Image (cartoon, grey):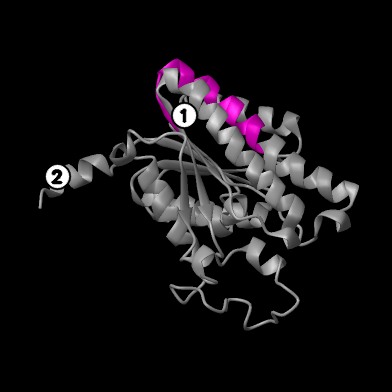
Amino acid sequence: MNMDYIKRIFCLDGKKAIVTGGNSGIGMGIAKSLANLGAEVTIVGRDPASIEKVSAELAALGTRSRGFQVDLTKKEEIDRFFDTYYAENDGKLDILVANAGISVMKRALETGEEEMDRLFNTNLKGTLSCCRRAAEAMKKQNHGNIVITTSVNALYPLPPQAVYTSTKIAQEALMQCLAVDLAPYGIRVNTIAPGAIVSNLGRDNPSPKKREGDWKKIPGLPLGRIGEPEDIGDVVACMVTDAFRYQTGSTVLVDGGLRLRNV
């Protein structure tokens, strides 16, 4: 086995990465996986305590890390963050993982106006605003990677999470459009679609049949367990390496076989 080759194509040494929602759940798993491959990781979130905690954990992995408190529903805060980030990093950015998102466990006709606004402003508008600002640096560099975290729901719609599902389907369409528009600049754009993962999002939206202590159990799940954040993080970290250099406009489904449980 040629270990030098493996190390070279899976290496992120010196790469600069931003992970939105990197202070918890799937985003935290992604941030740690990127750091373990050598990337310098900046995380964005809303909770100062968890931002500080995860930033320290990333630094302990031997990488340069910084955390910022940003409300992704507010464009002025997004712009302020990116302005600060670029000033501190010589205008360079190699990787954006647009992971931050919220969910509401309601059917379409039950979802209120405020809930719809929150979902679309965070999951779609916030994601697009971050992609726009990331593309500024990547276009000048003629290289870069953008990964958007969508959901298995984007591929197999779930009526009890109707509007959340709709925002995830919209993110898939956004990814495909960005992949075409940014390809001439050497920028790859893909999505990762997680299934059921141990995360704050999962805990906050249990079904009525699930109670504390058994919410991690999904009958018929082929791999027999709910996924961990690092199960997604390791895949994303690989996607932005040279090992996946010819991949763009693609959706990577990582769901433990969830879509097959009723087959």
Q: Residues within 10 Å of mark 1 (few under 14, many from 20)?
A: many
Q: Is residue 69 visible?
A: no
Q: Is residue 32 above or below residue 213?
A: above
Q: Which residue is at 10% across, 53% downward?
A: 1
Q: Which residue is at 33% across, 33% downward?
A: 246
Where on the picture, by quarter, is residue 76?
top right
**Residue 143 x, y percent position in the rendering:** 40, 24
Q: Is residue 57 magenta?
A: no
Magenta stretch, residue numbers: 127-145
Where on the picture, by quarter, is residue 231?
bottom left
Which secondary structure is most common in the magenta stretch? Answer: helix
Q: Which residue is at 69% across, 39% downward?
A: 124
Q: Depth check: give the residue in front, 51 or 255.
A: 255
Q: Is residue 133 magenta?
A: yes
Name the residue that disc number 1 marks.
93
Name the residue that disc number 2 marks.
4
Where on the picture, by quarter, is residue 244?
top left
Lower sequence index among marks 1 and 2: 2
Q: Which residue is at 58% across, 48% downward?
A: 150
Q: Is residue 143 above or below residue 233?
A: above
Looking at the picture, which amino acid does disc 1 mark? Leu
The span from disc 1 to disc 2 (Cα, nearest Å) is 26 Å
**Residue 114 x, y percent position in the rendering:** 88, 47
**Lateral position of residue 255 relative to residue 10, left or right:** right
Q: Depth check: give the residue in front, 102 or 169.
A: 169
Q: Is residue 142 visible?
A: yes
